[in-house]
Amino acid sequence: MEEQSFILDNRFIIKPSLGVIRDAQTGQETRIEPRLMSLLCLLAENHGKLVARPVITKQIWDDYGNADEGLTQAISYLRKVLADDEKALIETVPKKGYVLHAKVVYDGPDENLKHVHGARRGKFILIAALVFILVVVAFFIYRSRQAQKQFNPDIIPAAQGIHANDTTRENANPDKLPDTVKKVQPDADKVK
């Protein structure tokens, strides 16, 4: 296939040469057979316009006699791949043909593909930046609370309270000299 890549409704990236439809929203990639891809390309070339069943039968099925049933199945499969459960993207005009109601972008497919992927990347970068900011803010809040605990004069660490009580108890006994007071011993030279 020589058709140019295109995008449907800023969501589906169509690569006819590879036979691939990629949903940029979900990341799901689906390979479809060449006849289905040719049908989708024909509808895309005529988006917004009625493509008559006889035209499709002639161009895609080479005027094969039982092409009507194959065409109906092909449209059903394309709707499934394009998440067209409401049948709004590919409209059936009874007994006449089909109309593709989608924004089709061909110009500079690489630029458009970058735009579709760039939007996802932009969201990822935004979320990553927000998470980083939240982590930094949480860190500084934690550090400031730790600093308040260390420098708060109303809070006496448990170790200081125990030490103060032990010293008071030792000094409370008048018969016992505190360890910090040196006992004075008379000089042996003066006594003689």
Image (cartoon, rainbow, N blue to C red):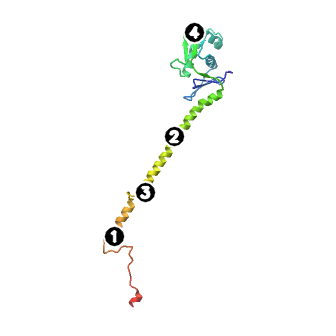
What's the mark number on residue 130? 2
Quadrant location of the C terminus in the rendered image: bottom left
Q: Nearer the viewer, mark 1 or mark 2?
A: 2
Mark 2–mark 4 contact, CB under 8 Å? Answer: no
Disc 4 to disc 1, how far (Cα)? 108 Å
- The disc, 4 or 1, on the residue closer to the chain's N-terminal end is 4
Disc 4 to disc 3, how far (Cα)? 84 Å
Quadrant position of residue 189: bottom left
Disc 2 to disc 4, how far (Cα)? 53 Å
Sort mark 1 into few (<14), some (14-19) or many (20+) by Cα contacts within 10 Å: some
Disc 3 to disc 2, how far (Cα)? 32 Å
Q: What residue type is disc 1 on? A: Glu
Sort mark 4 into few (<14), some (14-19) or many (20+) by Cα contacts within 10 Å: few
Quadrant location of the N terminus in the rendered image: top right
x%, y% of residue 102?
Answer: 57, 20
Q: Is residue 123 above or below residue 44?
A: below
Q: Which residue is mark 4?
A: 96
Disc 1 to disc 2, how far (Cα)? 59 Å
Q: Is residue 188 above or below residue 43?
A: below
What's the mark number on residue 151? 3
- The disc, 3 or 1, on the residue closer to the chain's N-terminal end is 3
Q: Which residue is mark 1?
A: 170
Q: Secondary structure at mark 2?
A: helix
Q: What residue type is disc 2 on? A: Leu
What's the mark number on residue 62? none
x%, y% of residue 168?
Answer: 33, 68
Q: Nearer the viewer, mark 2 or mark 4?
A: 2
Disc 3 to disc 1, how far (Cα)? 30 Å
Mark 1–mark 2 contact, CB under 8 Å? Answer: no
Q: Secondary structure at mark 4?
A: loop
